[in-house]
């Protein structure tokens, strides 16, 4: 009888847990941000069939994912009791237009933000710093302009940052040295100026693409030892190739073509044991 009683209790505990999971409630703060985002988008760009067009706040977002009123664009996870938090915001590539700066971005449990290949304009929001758990930010292929906010350097959990193919200008913030978990950094195809900063403190960084900008000055003197690919073609970089590039034990790709580099190319680059692709054409190297 006692054994049956314990089994019965365990059964109802599991049943209750499943009930909570199936009928979770989205945290009010997350709902507010989702409303702000939808309101910031031009209604004419939310045509039938798009994710944002399906968002209907007469129902609970996290409790209706995949339904008629929240077809796509979100992922939620149960965090405390029956309260769900938005952990992924990935919009479809529907040419949404509007500005991101009117959104508070107060989504403390968000891990992935992806609005790639749309038509958002205006600046990158300073309030992205509220995304304290975010690991991936994808803003590629929009019409974002202005400078890169230094507040992005506070995102200590960030692993991948995609800012490529926008209209961003100004210099790369020195605060990026605070991105200790960053593995991939892409901002090719913008109008970035100034010297490329030394990011040797980013011990996990293995991919940098800064091509097709207006970066000037000399190459950084030091690099993260973890670097695998460095692409900085089509800029205005001057000076010599630093010896520190030769000392990168894991580097596989170096593309510094279409710059203003001069001096001689270190012979040891051509025999580097891990280097698979070396592109140095269209520079001003001596014979």
Image: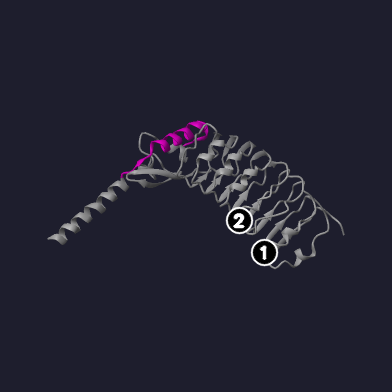
Residue 124 image point, x, y percent: 59, 37
Q: Residue at x 72, y 59 (%)?
A: 245
Residue 183 among those drawn in magenta: no
Residue 112 image point, x, y percent: 50, 47
Residue 264 image point, x, y percent: 83, 58
Task: Please tell me whether residue 254 is drawn above or below residue 173 in the rendered image.
Answer: below
Residue 192 image point, x, y percent: 69, 42
Helix, strand or loop at label 1? It is loop
Between residue 16 and residue 69, name the one nearer to us. Answer: 16
In the picture of the structure, the residue carrying the numbered disc 2 is: 203
In the picture of the structure, the residue carrying the numbered disc 1 is: 249
Label 2 to label 1: alpha-carbon separation: 13 Å
Task: Report which quarter residue 153 is drawn in.
Answer: top right
Chain part drawn in magenta? 23-49
Q: Residue at x 71, y 58 (%)?
A: 254
Task: Please tell me whether residue 28 is drawn above or below residue 260 in the rendered image.
Answer: above
Q: Which mark is residue 216?
A: none
């Amino acid at each position: 009888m006692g054994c049956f009683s314990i089994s019965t209790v365990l059964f109802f505990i599991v049943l209750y847990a499943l009930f909570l999971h199936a009928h979770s409630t989205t945290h009010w703060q997350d709902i507010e941000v989702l409303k702000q985002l939808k309101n910031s988008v031009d209604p004419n760009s939310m045509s039938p069939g798009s994710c944002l067009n399906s968002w209907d706040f007469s129902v609970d977002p996290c409790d209706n994912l995949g339904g008629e009123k929240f077809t796509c664009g979100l992922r939620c996870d149960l965090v405390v009791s029956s309260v769900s938090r938005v952990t992924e915001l990935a919009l479809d590539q529907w040419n949404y237009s509007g500005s991101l700066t009117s959104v508070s971005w107060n989504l403390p449990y968000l891990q992935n933000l992806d609005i790639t290949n749309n038509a958002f304009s205006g600046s990158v929001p300073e309030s992205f710093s509220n995304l304290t758990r975010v690991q991936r930010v994808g803003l590629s292929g929009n019409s974002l302009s202005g400078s890169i906010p230094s507040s992005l350097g506070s995102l200590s959990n960030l692993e991948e940052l995609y800012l490529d193919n926008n209209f961003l200008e100004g210099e790369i913030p020195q605060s990026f040295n605070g991105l200790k978990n960053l593995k991939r950094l892409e901002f090719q195809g913008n109008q970035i100026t100034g010297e490329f900063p030394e990011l040797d403190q980013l011990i996990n960084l293995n991919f940098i693409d800064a091509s097709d900008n207006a970066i000037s000055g000399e190459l950084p003197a030091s690099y993260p030892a973890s670097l695998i690919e460095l692409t900085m073609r089509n800029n205005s970089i001057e000076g010599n190739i630093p010896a520190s590039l030769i000392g990168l034990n894991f580097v596989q790709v170096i593309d510094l073509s279409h710059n203003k580099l001069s001096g001689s190319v270190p012979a040891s680059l051509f025999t580097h044991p891990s280097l698979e692709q070396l592109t140095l054409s269209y520079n001003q190297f001596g014979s």
